[in-house]
Image (cartoon, grey):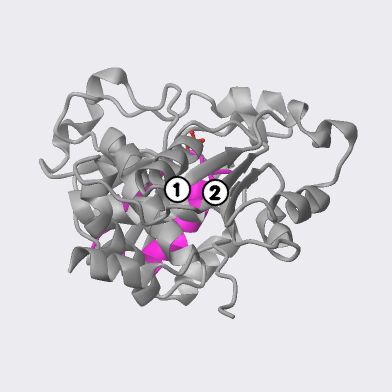
């Protein structure tokens, strides 16, 4: 029997592992757009267990599964499940993983997906664990960079909440596989944790740190902006101090290269002004769409259907 393939973090992924998913996603794009039909997941069920709010991760996984001919089982609101009666996460996983072929789990506790993988009867896909990892977002971010800019010799600014932003933490490790130059732009209170900076330096990655976007805006290929994660601040006063500290405006990006792309995992609150949406730089809504082909590829990988994708598109 083939060992279960969980997706918990992309920290240890090699370039080959990333490239395999990105290449499958490219082949699956016509199905993701609804231009071509598919039934390769006929008879397969994907369970969605979301203990935190989500629009994109939850709905793009649903779309991916439905477009591939599979079905989706959504636990729905936590209050309507037996967790409200005190059932533990591990018991919930033990039970629900027997109802599906794979489980997407989003949970506020860092490490929840890893714990779930140790007691699950089906592959676990981490849909975000607290301030930990968000590997499927990382894969769709890489895909967006590949499609809208370039992965090799990339000069990227990671901006906003670098302390609590799990998409940033996962993306840093992935970009290190492609030798990107990484510019960290944040207020001092929201800087990237030292352990991650140390890991990047150990991987010989060129890292710069600044509080001022104007220091890097002219040179970068991609600006990856993030929301300040209000829900992760232990002290609301600390959030209030930094909540409006960074904002991308049309004026700020005037000196950017014409091909510079702005990405954001979304949702945005006020960190990108709405008039940026109509500029040639805005790539964040396309990025949200790319979640569909990438999550299709992830499902194929987790369910061991890579050969079907190869045969289907040859
Ligand atoms: N980017 C992202 O994870 O969005 P959601 O929280 O809406 O899933």
- Among the 4 quarters of the image, the one containing residue 290: top left
As drawn, is 103 to the left or to the right of 202? right
Q: Which mark is residue 70?
A: 1
Give the spatial CA distance, label 1 vs label 2. Answer: 8 Å
Query: If the image is split into quadrants, where does the N terminus sit?
Result: bottom right
Query: If the image is split into quadrants, where does the C terminus sit?
Result: bottom left
**Residue 303: % across, % down:** 49, 64
Task: Tell me the SS state at disc 2.
Answer: strand
* Residue ID at (23%, 57%): 26
Label 1–label 2 contact, CB within 8 A: yes
Q: Mark 1: give few (<14), some (14-19) or many (20+) Cα within 10 Å.
A: some
Q: Mark 2: give few (<14), some (14-19) or many (20+) Cα within 10 Å.
A: many
Q: Is mark 2 within 8 Å of ligand 1?
A: no
Q: Residue furthest bottom?
A: 1
Q: Which residue is mark 2?
A: 46
Q: Which residues are magenta?
A: 154-180
User: Of label 1 and label 2, which has the lower sequence position?
Assistant: 2
* Residue ID at (32%, 29%): 248
Q: Looking at the picture, does residue 245 appear above or below residue 306? A: above
**Residue 279: % across, % down:** 16, 28
């Amino acid at each position: 029997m083939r060992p279960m393939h969980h997706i918990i973090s992309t920290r240890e992924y090699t370039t080959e592992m990333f490239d395999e998913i990105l290449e499958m996603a490219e082949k699956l794009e016509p199905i993701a757009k609804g231009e071509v039909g598919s039934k390769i997941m006929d008879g397969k069920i994907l369970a969605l267990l979301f203990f935190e709010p989500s629009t994109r991760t939850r709905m793009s996984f649903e779309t991916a599964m439905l477009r591939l001919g599979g079905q989706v089982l959504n636990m729905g609101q936590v209050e309507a499940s037996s967790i409200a009666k005190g059932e533990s996460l591990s018991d919930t996983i033990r039970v629900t993983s027997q109802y599906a072929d794979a489980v997407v789990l989003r949970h506020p506790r860092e490490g929840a997906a890893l714990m779930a993988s140790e007691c699950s009867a089906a592959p676990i896909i981490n849909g975000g664990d607290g301030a930990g990892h968000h590997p499927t977002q990382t894969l769709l971010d890489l895909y967006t960079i590949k499609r809208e800019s370039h992965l090799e010799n990339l000069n990227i600014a990671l901006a906003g909440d670098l302390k609590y932003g799990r998409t940033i933490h996962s993306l840093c490790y992935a970009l290190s596989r492609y030798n990107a130059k990484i510019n960290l732009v944040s207020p001092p209170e929201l800087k990237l944790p030292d352990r991650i900076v140390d890991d990047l330096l150990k991987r010989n990655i060129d890292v710069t740190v600044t509080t001022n976007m104007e220091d890097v805006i002219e040179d970068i290929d991609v600006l990856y902006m993030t929301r300040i994660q209000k829900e992760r601040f232990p002290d609301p006063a600390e959030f209030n101090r930094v909540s409006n500290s960074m904002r991308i405006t049309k004026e700020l990006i005037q000196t950017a290269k014409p091909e510079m792309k702005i990405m954001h995992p979304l949702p945005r609150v006020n960190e990108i002004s709405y008039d940026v949406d109509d500029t040639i730089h805005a790539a964040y809504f396309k990025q949200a769409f790319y979640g569909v082909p990438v999550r299709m590829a992830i499902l194929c990988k987790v369910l061991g259907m890579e050969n079907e994708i190869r045969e289907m598109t040859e």
